[in-house]
Image (cartoon, helix red, strand yellow):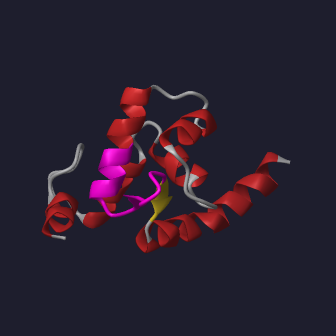
Amino acid sequence: MAKQASSRSSGVRGSRTGRPIMALLDLLGRRWSLRILWELRDAPLTSRALRTACDEASPTVLQTRLSELREAGFVELGEAGGYGLTPLGRDLCETFMPLHRFAERWRK
């Protein structure tokens, strides 16, 4: 757990303060981060299934983002080998649902 705490309090790009909101937005703003969380919202996926769901994202970038999301405490590697959301990750995805519903209305 100490690893997670230290990664959450470390400096972030574009911020001298490293405030939690800035760290979160920095992580979520990285390429594929939000997409990975979105694809895992319903059920765990293997690396291959996740890559397919993410429109064949680069395996290197996908693994880098998965590592970052795991270190942040949002994603975990299950015993069966698939990636899934942690309780914290599920909470984060629930936080985005009002924005998702708004986007669906806006798109129409």
Which region is colored magenta? 66-82
Residue 66 in the image: above or below residue 41: above
* Residue 40 magenta-highlighted: no
Q: Is residue 51 left or right of residue 69?
A: right
* Residue 67 magenta-highlighted: yes
x, y percent for residue 26: 33, 49
x, y percent for residue 24: 34, 58
Residue 100 in the image: above or below residue 92: above
Residue 65 in the image: above or below residue 57: below
Outermost residue to the right: 108
The part of the image, by quadrant, that contains residue 6 is bottom left
x, y percent for residue 53: 62, 39
**Quadrant including the N terminus:** bottom left
Q: Is residue 22 left or right of residue 41?
A: left
Q: Residue at x 60, y 60 (%)?
A: 43
Q: Residue at x 43, y 28 (%)?
A: 59
Q: Residue at x 49, y 59 (%)?
A: 84
- Say if residue 90 shows up in the picture: yes
User: How many badges with numbers are in the image?
Assistant: 0
- Say if residue 26 shows up in the picture: no
Q: Is residue 19 left or right of residue 67?
A: left
